[in-house]
Amino acid sequence: MKQIQLTQVSKRFGDVEVIPPLDLEIEDGEFVVFVGPSGCGKSTLLRLIAGLEDVTSGAVIINGEDATGIPPARRSLAMVFQSYALYPHMSVRKNIAFPLRMAGLDKAEQNRRVEDAANVLNLTEYLDRRPGQLSGGQRQRVAIGRAIVREPTAFLFDEPLSNLDAALRVGMRLEISELHKRLATTMIYVTHDQVEAMTMADKIVVLQLGVIEQIGSPLELYRNPQNIFVAGFIGSPRMNLLEGSEAAAHNAHTIGIRPEHISISTDKGDWEGVVGVTEHLGSDTFFHVSCPAFANPLTVRAGGDVDLSYGTKIFLTPDKAHLHRFDDKGLRLT
Amino acid sequence: MMAPAVVLLLGWMLVPLTMTLFFSFKKYLPLRGGDLGWVGFENYVRFVSSSSFWPAVGTTLLIVGGVLVITVLLGIALALLLDQPIWGQGIVRILVIAPFFVMPTVSGLVWKNMFMDPVNGFFAHIWRLFGAEPIQWLSHASMPSLVMIISWQWLPFATLILLTAIQSMDFEQLEAAEMDGARPVGRFWFITLPHLARAITVVILIQTIFLLSIFAEIFVTTAGAFGTKTLTYLIFQRVLESQNVGLGSAGGVYAIILANIVAVFLLRIVGKNLDA
Ligand SMILES: Nc1ncnc2c1ncn2[C@@H]1O[C@H](COP(=O)(O)OP(=O)(O)O)[C@@H](O)[C@H]1O
Ligand SMILES: [Mg+2]
């Protein structure tokens, strides 16, 4: 069932059109990630769905009902903000209970739901603390707790992990994914980090300058990027994008090849190059290889046990089956 | 070893305090014989047993309390208004702050002669415009008039502090509250007001310190008549009008004690907002 639908939604701030008219459909229970570089309009799009911004044109349909003019509180959506936006003068218990209190639920029911949420989020022993006395990860969980007690139709997350350190981020990523599996509620998640998008999403929406570049599952985007932007944005390290005669040889303006689809040999291959900086991750090794044929160095992935010293002359061979071809407008050629 | 700043501060406070204490135990009448020797606690007893003492304490507290209530309430309202995006915001803000730059003596005289004069004052004209009998502001409504004048002077201070507090507010908290179903009044009550608690505390503490020693406004308007004699004004009368330095000094010591009682009292009820 389509749960949230945007039809020809656009947004202007004064003279600047941040979001040109776009259509988007989100299915019930899906984990959708909006991903794109900073300033591309992800937050704005999320706020349009939440009702915190008014659309300039178009309609937001939630559960089959036109919600365009409905205030945020009555859209039955819950949002987790980037800054967490916890109420600093209230205890964790009061923070989580706030939406229930505003909805006029009786005290016993409030307490029951708060304690349930605290249980799920491992917050039980912190219920009487203030947000200021919690760590970043705990604050994050309180913000999530405040969202889940309302039992909303959908959750909106705006870069919820960007204020956490790397280790916590990985942990919270898993927790949010697990929460999604358990609640089976629609989640819309905004991030600029394509790793978060790839690891968490059922469906990724790639945005650039307010325009949807591609919608699809993580692997669809990885395997069949529809344009150069998506090809370069999804995947880490980035896909190698090559222009010039080598691209022309494949009847394309640009060709793309991912680091793991290039094989290395010390005696023969298609492209000759010199090993530059090497990044050892243990499981993998990434070589930055300068080839006279291309302007920029290529990134090549090899196994963790491969070791080539700086300046070694090597040969690279791309896997033809995984070569991506793009025309001069940046669109994929089939 | 004490830090130089502490020594300086102690000297700064101790010298006048010691002199006040010194004179408060003497009979010292500059124009009627000068230093007439030690008299023990006689000045203290005389100061409190004077029929003007308790009314003066009451008047002081009434002015401080009245001005605090008005400036805090109106200050919050004005700060909320000024925080809205309005046309000509810069000019409006400067206008709101302006009264703070008017000297107390000047503002007292302006209010007395241009607004509250029962014959030619602005209010008198307005009252007559509606066919009403003009109010004799400074004689028949002396306390409300004084509270009004002093509030007018201190409102900008309160507004400014509260406005900066409102502007430092994380607007995502308000949006979160909006999504949580809080209506505008609820958002103000549950989010904005608690956020302002600390600023309100600062406004109350600072204003109290200055309001306890209000003088010029009373001097130029009612000169202490019509029940507007504060403790500060009473001390002034004892020292300069009665030329009794010893008695005035004893009053000064009482004023210090009163200020400390008020300060402790305030810190008890609002000071907890200052920690954390
Ligand atoms: N309230 C606003 N007024 C004017 N411009 C805004 C406003 N909010 C966002 N923008 C602009 O809209 C663009 C998209 O912003 P945003 O949605 O926050 O991007 P993202 O979340 O993808 O980083 C940015 O160029 C930003 O400057
Ligand atoms: Mg953003």
Image (tube, helix red, strand yellow):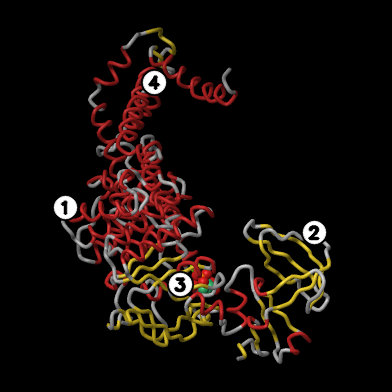
Query: What amino acid type is highlighted by mark number 1?
Result: Ala
Query: What amino acid type is highlighted by mark number 3?
Result: Val
Which residue position is annotated with label 3?
Answer: A33
Image position, residue A72 (x, y; %):
32, 71
Q: Quadrant of residue B124?
A: bottom left
Q: Nearer the viewer, residue A286 or A205?
A: A286
Image position, residue A32 (x, y; %):
42, 73
10 Å neighbourhood of mark 1: few (<14), some, or many (≥20)? few
Query: Residues at marks 4 and 2, common chain?
Result: no
Residue drawn at (71%, 72%) of the image: A263
Which residue position is annotated with label 2?
Answer: A309
Disc 2 chain ID: A
Tell which residue pokes out farthest to the front in this image.
Answer: A267
Between circles 3 and 1, the one closer to the viewer is 3
Q: Which dot marks residue B249?
A: 4
Image position, residue B131 (x, y; %):
20, 65
Q: Which dot marks residue B232?
A: none
Residue drawn at (70%, 88%) of the image: A253
B272 is higher (above) or lower (below) than A261: above
Which residue position is annotated with label 1?
Answer: A108
Q: Quadrant of residue B105?
A: top left
Label 4: element kind = helix
Q: Are dots 3 and 1 in contact, CB under 8 Å?
A: no
A93 is higher (above) or lower (below) than A318: above
Q: Are dots 1 and 2 in contact, CB under 8 Å?
A: no
Query: What amino acid type is highlighted by mark number 4?
Result: Ser
Disc 3 chain ID: A
Query: Residues at marks 1 and 2, common chain?
Result: yes
Between circles 1 and 4, the one closer to the viewer is 1
